[in-house]
Amino acid sequence: MKTIMKTTNTNLKNFLALLAITIVLVFSSCSNNEDDNLEENSENLSEIVMQDFVEEINNLSVPSALMNSNNQYAQEANAQFESLKSLSTSFSSLFVIPDYALSTKTSSKVVSKSSSSNTQTYSWSSGDTTVEYTITEASDRYSFTYYVTSPDFTGKLMAGYQLIDGSYAEVNLYYDNIVESTIKWWVNDEDIKIELSSDDFKLILESNATDNSGNLKVYYSNTLTALYEWNADGTGTYTNYYTNETYSW
């Protein structure tokens, strides 16, 4: 168990550090700009893309009995849940567009409406740092990319897509054109699933939005190493696949 927790915490810390650097880098370009230049647009794509996902993730919770339990395995389950939720909601910062960002929009159509697309690019800068956030609307999805130019980092920082029906979204974080971390969301009427992967480490959370029951799987090198499962009343189990032992609370 200690090995599992150590692996989990180390990777989460590394991912948190990467995400913190990303957010600071992107939004440091906004701190000294007081212009209000965002163009009026009948359909502002930044107000559509990922906003429902952000709301769904922010509303995630575990049962109060689990949250307040003194059992060490229940506390571990809650800590893992909160860490993954925090990482997932942190991405919402990257989808907030400053009011003073410049916006340009283009449309294209090839042969038929099914192959048409709309692209909206937001840009803002301060000093030596410039950010370009581009969203492209296609028939079934919104694709998006962050590109940053600065003395410390130049290149694609984030890219991903959201299905228009709101059922799935995926985001990659890049450094030096290499994917450092990936996060995926699945959403339906009651169930939400989040998958976070970074290096050889992966967390998968499944949560019922109605009764807050759920489970969280921990993988290392594509091998399931730990499983936390909890019921609507807050009871649950923890399974350590290194030792094949299961504990209840």
Image (cartoon, helix red, strand yellow):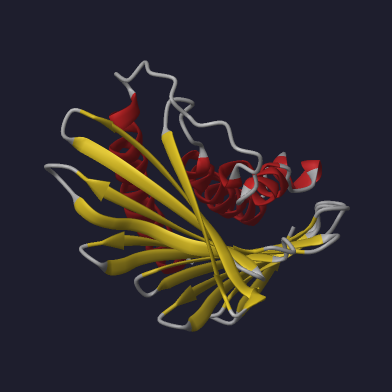
Q: 244 or 143, which lies in front?
A: 143
Q: Which residue of the protein is positioned furthest toward the top in this rendering? A: 34
Q: Which residue of the protein is positioned furthest toward the front in this rendering? A: 111
Q: Is residue 170 visible?
A: no
Quadrant in the picture for residue 92: top right
Quadrant in the picture for residue 180: bottom left
Count of labels shown? Answer: 0
Q: Which residue of the protein is positioned furthest toward the left in this rendering? A: 151
Give above or below for 12 relative to 112: above
Give above or below for 32 relative to 96: above
Residue in view at x 61 percent, y 77 percent: 245
Q: 228 or 192, which lies in front?
A: 192
- Location of residue 37 in the rendering, given as x and y in whole percent from the top left corner: 43, 25
Give above or below for 239 relative to 145: below
Q: 109 or 198, which lies in front?
A: 109
Q: Is residue 224 left or right of residue 58?
A: left
| On-image quarter of the C terminus | bottom right
Q: Is residue 46 left or right of residue 33?
A: right
- Location of residue 141 in the rendering, given as x and y in whole percent from the top left corner: 62, 66
Q: Is residue 12 left or right of residue 51?
A: left
Residue in view at x 79 percent, y 41 percent: 64
Residue in view at x 42 percent, y 32 percent: 101
Residue in view at x 36 percent, y 15 percent: 34
- Location of residue 122 in the rendering, given as x and y in whole percent from the top left corner: 42, 42
